[in-house]
Image (spheres, grey):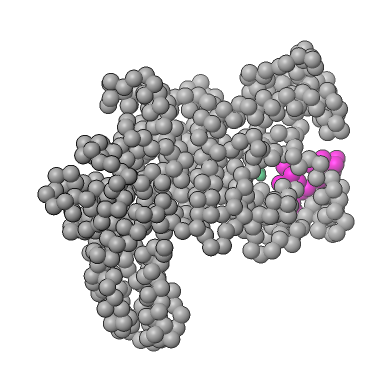
C-alpha cells in the first residue's frame, strides 16, 4: 500500500497536470510546525517562475481541483504560495487500520531490488579489534538490516586485514620463540604478540632481514609459514566472531573475504591491466593514471597498483575485490563502511575501477565514511593509561554500567533477568549512541549520556516500549485480539500520533536510499515523545467510551510495533520489562 505521502504526491501531480499540462514534482513534505497542518506542498513558487504567474494563484487553482477529496480536512494556501494540508481524521484512521493488519507496517518491498555489497567489519588479523572498528560493524550492520528489509539482495563482505608484510615479523617471531608445528597453539593475546614482534623488528636488523625473507616465503607458499599464518588468522576470526555475536552484528565467518582471498588474483589482474593499456609503468611501478588527483605541489597522483619491487598494495587488493564484487557477485552497488580518513583512497579506487573495468554508469560505489570515536575531552578515545580502548572491554563495561542503572530502578530482579536486560540495554545504548549521530561527524563517547533514560538514547526508546507493555498488562489486554480494533480519532493528540505512525514507510525507504541512519533514530525519538504527549492527555484504559478505548489501545500497540521494528532495523532489541 502506498504511504500517505506517496498518495499526496500522485494526487497533486495529477491536479497540476490537469490545470497546467505539466509533469511537476509537487514537493510534498511533512509539515514541521503544527500550524502548517500535516503536510505542505511547496511546488507553486518554482512553477510560477516557469509559467510567469503568481504563486498564490497557482496554489489556489490546485486547491480548487482537490478540495472535494475526502482525504482532506483542510487545504489552504499560506505565505507566498505554499499549500498547507490537513488530513481528515476518518481517512487517517482507515489508513492506520490497514497498516495495523500488515506485518510489515506498510513498508513495501522495492519494485527494483538492487544487489548491494556491504563491506564492513574490516578488522585486522593479529591485532585486537578496537573501537575504530566498532563503528564500521554497527553502522554496516544497520545498512544490511534496512536494505534487506526493503527487499534488496544484500551481500555482506568482511574485508579483513589478513595478509601483508606484518605476517613476516609475526611468523618469524613465533618461530624464534619456540613455535612447533605439531602442537595446538592458542594466541590469547595477539595484540601483545604483534607489539613484541614489531619492537624486535625495529631494533634488530638481523631479525628484520629474516622477517622480510619470511614474507617472501609466505607468499610463495612455504608450508610452515602458511601453517602459522593460518593459525593466526583462525584465532583472530574466532576472536572477532565473539565480538560480533556479543554485539548482535550479523557478520559470520562465511562473510569473511579478507585480503588473502584476493591474493591469487593480483598477479593476473595487474598483468591484464598492463597489457590492455589501462595501467602504465611509471619509474618501474605500475600505475593507473587518474584525472583530478594532485599532491600538494600540484603534481598528478596516479593510483599505484604494483610497487617497483613487484609487491602489491592495499589498493591492488581493493581493485581486485571491486572486480570480483561487480563481475562475480553481480553487485550493482557497493557500500564501503570505512573510516573517513580513507576518503582519498576510495575516491581514487572508484575512479581507477571505472577506468579499468568499464563499470556501467548505474553501478553505484559509495564510501559511507564515518568519523572518529572521541573521548569526552574530544581527543581520540583512550584508556586512562593512554592505550587505545579494546572492544571487548568496552562491551563488558557497557553491560556492567547498564546493569547498575537498571538495578537502581528495579532492585528486585533475579540475577538472570538482570543480566539479560543489562545486555540488551548496554549494547543497545552503545549502538544507538553511535547510530544517532550523523555518521560523518566524529562522535563523542559518553557513558552517562548514552545510558540516560531521558533524551534521544537507546534506553529511552526501549523504555517507551516497556511503558506500553505495562499498559497492556495493567489492562489485561490480549494483543492478538486487538489488531482488528477500529481507530477513531477525536483529539489533536491522536491525530498527530497517527500522522507520526503513518510516516514509518517513508522514513525507512528514505534511509534505504540515502543511508542517513540518524534520520531513523530521530524519527523513533520523535515518535516516542509524541506518544508520551498523547498518553498524558488521552486516557487509554479508563475512557468510558469503549470505541475510543479500543482505538487508543490499538494506537498504543501500533506505537510499540513501530518502535520494535525501527529498533530492530538498527540492530537493537526491545524488552517487555526492564
Ligand atoms: N582493514 C582495513 C582497516 O582496518 C579496513 C578495510 C576496509 N575495506 C576495504 N575494502 N578497504 O583500515
| Residue located farthest toward the front when viewing the structure as drawn | 481
Vertical side of 185 occupied by 294: above or below: below
Q: Residue at x 59, y 30 (%)?
A: 241
Image height check: is 350 above or below 204?
below
Image coordinates for residue 566, horizontal then vertical, percent: 41, 47
In front here: 303 or 524?
A: 524
Q: Name the image quarter holding residue 75.
A: bottom left
Q: Is residue 386 left or right of residue 239?
A: left
Classify 39 as above or below 342: below
Number of marks: 0
Residue 109 located left or right of residue 343: left
Query: Which of the 4 quarters of the picture holds residue 226?
Result: top right
What residue is at 53 percent from the left and 63 percent from the top?
A: 111
Q: Is residue 468 visible?
A: no
| Quadrant of res 417 | top left
> Is residue 436 at all visible to an observer of this figure?
yes
Q: Quadrant of ligand 1?
A: top right
Q: Magenta stretch containing residue 157, yes or no? A: no
In what quadrant of the picture does the C terminus appear? top left
| Residue extending farthest left | 544
Give the percent coordinates (x, y) of residue 302.
Answer: 75, 53
Q: Quadrant of the N terminus?
A: bottom left
Viewer-side residue, 466 vs 118: 466
Q: Residue at x 78, y 40 (%)?
A: 263
Q: Which residues are magenta?
A: 299-318
Query: Looking at the image, which residue is at 28% across and 48% down?
Result: 482
Left or right of 482 in this view: 235: right
Query: Residue 412: where, in percent of width, then height?
Result: 28, 20
551 or 156: nearer the viewer: 551
Is 305 magenta? The answer is: yes
Q: Is residue 572 above or below residue 534?
A: above
- Could you say where residue 195 lies in the image, as x and y percent from the top left? 66, 22
Amino acid at each position: 500500500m502506498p504511504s500517505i505521502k506517496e498518495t499526496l504526491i500522485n494526487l497533486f501531480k495529477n491536479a497540476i497536470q490537469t490545470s497546467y499540462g505539466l509533469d511537476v514534482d509537487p514537493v510534498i513534505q511533512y509539515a514541521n510546525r503544527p500550524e502548517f497542518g500535516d503536510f505542505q506542498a511547496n511546488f507553486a513558487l518554482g512553477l510560477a517562475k516557469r509559467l510567469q504567474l503568481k504563486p498564490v494563484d497557482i496554489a489556489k487553482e490546485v486547491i480548487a481541483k482537490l478540495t472535494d477529496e475526502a482525504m482532506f480536512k483542510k487545504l489552504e494556501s499560506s505565505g507566498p504560495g505554499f499549500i498547507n494540508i490537513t488530513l481528515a481524521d476518518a481517512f487517517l484512521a482507515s489508513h492506520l487500520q490497514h497498516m495495523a493488519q500488515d506485518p510489515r507496517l506498510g513498508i513495501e518491498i522495492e519494485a527494483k531490488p538492487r544487489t548491494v555489497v556491504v563491506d564492513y567489519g574490516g578488522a585486522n588479523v593479529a591485532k585486537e579489534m578496537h573501537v575504530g572498528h566498532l563503528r564500521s560493524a554497527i553502522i554496516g550492520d544497520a545498512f544490511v538490516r534496512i536494505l534487506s528489509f526493503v527487499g534488496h539482495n544484500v551481500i555482506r563482505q568482511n574485508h579483513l586485514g589478513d595478509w601483508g608484510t606484518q605476517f613476516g615479523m609475526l611468523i618469524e617471531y613465533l618461530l624464534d620463540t619456540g613455535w612447533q608445528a605439531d602442537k595446538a597453539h592458542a594466541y590469547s593475546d595477539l595484540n601483545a604478540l604483534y607489539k613484541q614482534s614489531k619492537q624486535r623488528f625495529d631494533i634488530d636488523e638481523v631479525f628484520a632481514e629474516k622477517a622480510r625473507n619470511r614474507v617472501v616465503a609466505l607468499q610463495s607458499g612455504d608450508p610452515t609459514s602458511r601453517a602459522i599464518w593460518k593459525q593466526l588468522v583462525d584465532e583472530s576470526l574466532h576472536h572477532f566472531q565473539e565480538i560480533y555475536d556479543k554485539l548482535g552484528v550479523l557478520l559470520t565467518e562465511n562473510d569473511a573475504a579478507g585480503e588473502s582471498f584476493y591474493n591469487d588474483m593480483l598477479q593476473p589482474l595487474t598483468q591484464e591491466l598492463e597489457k590492455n593499456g589501462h595501467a602504465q609503468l611509471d619509474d618501474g611501478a605500475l600505475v593507473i593514471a587518474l584525472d583530478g588527483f594532485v599532491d600538494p605541489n600540484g603534481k598528478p597522483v596516479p593510483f599505484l597498483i604494483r610497487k617497483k619491487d613487484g609487491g602489491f598494495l592495499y589498493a591492488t587488493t581493493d581493485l581486485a575485490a571491486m572486480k570480483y564484487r561487480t563481475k562475480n557477485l553481480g553487485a550493482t552497488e557497493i557500500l564501503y563502511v570505512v573510516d573517513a580518513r580513507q576518503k582519498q583512497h576510495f575516491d581514487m579506487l572508484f575512479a581507477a575501477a571505472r577506468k579499468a573495468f568499464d563499470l556501467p554508469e548505474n553501478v553505484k560505489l559509495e564510501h559511507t565514511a564515518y568519523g572518529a570515536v572521541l573521548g569526552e575531552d574530544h581527543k581520540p578515545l583512550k584508556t586512562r593509561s593512554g592505550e587505545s580502548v579494546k572492544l571487548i572491554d568496552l562491551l563488558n563495561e557497557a553491560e556492567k554500567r547498564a546493569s547498575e542503572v537498571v538495578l537502581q530502578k528495579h532492585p528486585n530482579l533475579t540475577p538472570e533477568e538482570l543480566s539479560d536486560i543489562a545486555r540488551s540495554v548496554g549494547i543497545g545504548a552503545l549502538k544507538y549512541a553511535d547510530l544517532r549521530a550523523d555518521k560523518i561527524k566524529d562522535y563523542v563517547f559518553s557513558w552517562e549520556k548514552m545510558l540516560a533514560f531521558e533524551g534521544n538514547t537507546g534506553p529511552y526508546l526501549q523504555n517507551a516500549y516497556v511503558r506500553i507493555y505495562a499498559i497492556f498488562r495493567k489492562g489485561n489486554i490480549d494483543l492478538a485480539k486487538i489488531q482488528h480494533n477500529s481507530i477513531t480519532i477525536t483529539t489533536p493528540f491522536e491525530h498527530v500520533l497517527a500522522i507520526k505512525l503513518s510516516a514509518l514507510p517513508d522514513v525507512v525507504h528514505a534511509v534505504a536510499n540515502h543511508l542517513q541512519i540518524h534520520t531513523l533514530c530521530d524519527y523513533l525519538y520523535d515518535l516516542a515523545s509524541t506518544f508520551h504527549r498523547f498518553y498524558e492527555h488521552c486516557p487509554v484504559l479508563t475512557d468510558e467510551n469503549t470505541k475510543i478505548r479500543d482505538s487508543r489501545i490499538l494506537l498504543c500497540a501500533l506505537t510499540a510495533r513501530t518502535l520494535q521494528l525501527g529498533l530492530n532495523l538498527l540492530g537493537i532489541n526491545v524488552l517487555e520489562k526492564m
